Image (cartoon, rainbow, N blue to C red):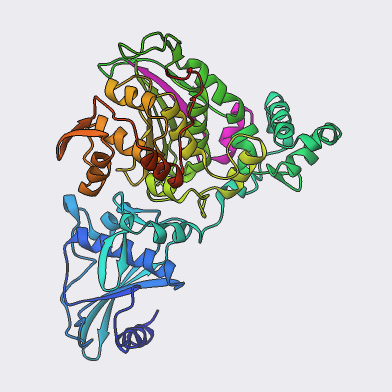
Amino acid sequence: MNETELVSLIDSLRRERIEKECFEFKLNAIDPQELGEYISALSNSACLEGEPKGYLIFGINNISHNVIGTQFDPFAEKGRGNQDLLIWLTIGLNPRVDVHPYIVNHPDGRVVLFQIGAASGRPVAFYGQEFIRVGSSKTSLREFPEKERLIWATGIDWSSHICSRASIDDLDRAAVLKARTQFKMKNPSLSEEVDDWDDSLFLDKARVAIRGCITNTAIILLGNPESASLIAPAVAKISWILKDNANRELDYDHLSPPFILKVDEILAHIRNLTLRTLPGGTLFPQEISQYDEWVLREALHNCIAHQDYSLHGRINAVETPNTVLLSNVGSFLPGSVEELIRRDTPSEIYRNPFLAEAMVNLNMIDTQGGGIKRMYLTQARRFFPLPDYDLSDPTRVCVTIRGEILDEHYTRLLMDRTDLDLEKVILLDKIQKRVRVSQEDHRLLKRFGLVEGRYPNLHVASMVARLTDQEAMHIRVKGLLLPQNPVGFGVRR
C-alpha cells in the first residue's frame, strides 16, 4: 500500500467507536515477546471475524483514538538473542502468516502499522503458544476451545488433497485386501457386491480415493512404504520405542505406511504380559492381561486420525514395563477430555475429516466419536487406572495407558461397587493418582463414602458401605453405569 492508502486505512480504524478484536492500538513500542503474542492473537481473531487482515498500530491512543506519534522503528529493533526483530518474529510464528510492518507519516504524527494475515485452517502460535483477542484483552487461545475449533474449521482438509505424483500402483496390495475385509465388516449388506468392484471403484466407495485419484489419506492408510515420500514435506511415520524403568532406550522400530497394517505390528511389539495376581483377599483367581488390546488400538487409531501431518512430527508409542504412552502432534480440538465424555456426543470438528471418514468406513474408528469414553469404560471394567491424557503442550496430545494396579483400595472399590457411574470413577481415579479434586467433587465422593482423609489430602476409602436403595436409584438415573458383571470376572458373592 502507498502512503495515502495507509493513512486512509489508519483513519478508518480510528473512526471505529471501539477497538474490534482484529485490531489494536498501542501508544508506543512493547516488549518483543508481547509483540509476537499480539500478532498471534490478531491473526486468529481476524480469522474468527471473517477479516482477511488484522492490524496492530503504534502511536495512537487506544481510548481517544487520537494520533500521538511514536519513535518505534520495527526495522531497527532487536528480538531475543539480539536477532533482528522482524526475523525473530517470523521464526516464532507457526504456521507462518504474512506480517508487513509500515512506517506511516500520518498528518498528525508518525505511526507504525503491522498488517497481519488472518489464520486459516489452524491457529497461529508464537513460539509454541496460541493467543486470541477477547474484547480488548489478549489471552491464551487454550482457554477458549470453542474458538480454536472454529479456526480449525476454516481450513482446507489436507487429508483430502489429491497426491498428484501417486497412482494406484503406489498402494500396498495386502493393505488394499485388508481394507476390503474391513469395509465388508463395516457394511455386511454390501459384502457380495464389494467382491465385484475393481480396486479403483472400491477405493472411491470407501472414500479413500476421489474419482480414481489417490489422496493423502490413501497414502497414509494404504500406501506402500516408499510412497510416504510422495506426501513430503508431511511426515507419515509411527515409532515404537521400548524403555526400562530408568528411561533407558532398549529397542525401537520406525514404521511407514500402510498404517492399516502397521498398527498390528506396533501392537505385536508391545509386551502385553499376563497378570496372575490381584489385590490380596479378593476372590478372583482369573488371569488378566496388562492391556486391553482394543484400548491400545483405539488410542493408536486416534493418533493417526488426529495427527497434524503438516507439523512434520511422528506418532510415538513409548513402552515401559508398566505403561504405554501414545502421542501425536497437533492440539486436542475438543478442548477437554472430561467435557467430551460428559457431553457424550461426537466432536463437531475434526482436523482430518476425510481421513477420519475413511477410517470409519474401514472399521478402524467409531463413527459416533465415542472411542475415548469407551476407553475409559473398558479400563474401569477391568478395574485398572483410567487413561491419562496430557494436554499441557498445546502442540501435542499424549495419552498414557497403565498396565498395573496403583491402589488396591481403588481396585477393590470398583469390584465391590459396580453400580458407580463413570463420573465418580473418574474422580476416584484422580484420588488414587494424587490429583487434586475440587471441594465440590470432594463433597460428592464423601457423601457416598468413597474417600477418606482431610481435604485436600484424600485417599480412596478402604471400607465401602453398601448403598441404600434410594442412593442406588439416584446413581442409576444419572446413567454412565458400569455393567453389573464386568467382562472377564464372575459375580462377587
Could you say where residue 453 lies in the image, as x and y percent from the top left?
Answer: 15, 33
Residue 424 included in the magenta stretch of the image: no
* Residue 310 in sight here: yes
**Quadrant of the rendered image containing residue 188:** top right
| Residue 272 shows in this picture | no
Examine the rendered structure and indicate whether residue 127 appears above or below residue 200: below
Q: Is residue 171 above or below residue 491?
A: below
Residue ID at (20%, 80%): 59
* Vertical relation: 20 (above or below) 274: below
Residue 246 drawn at (x, y percent): 25, 16
Q: Position of residue 136 (x, y in %)?
A: 26, 73
In the image, 113 versus 145, the foreground residue is: 145
- Which contiguous range is marked in magenta? 223-243
Which percent across, then down, holds residue 304?
52, 36
Which image quadrant: the C terminus? top left
Q: Is residue 158 left or right of residue 315?
A: right
Between residue 52 and residue 318, name the one nearer to us: 318
As drawn, 28 above or below 429 = below
> Which corner quadrant of the image does residue 62 belong to?
bottom left
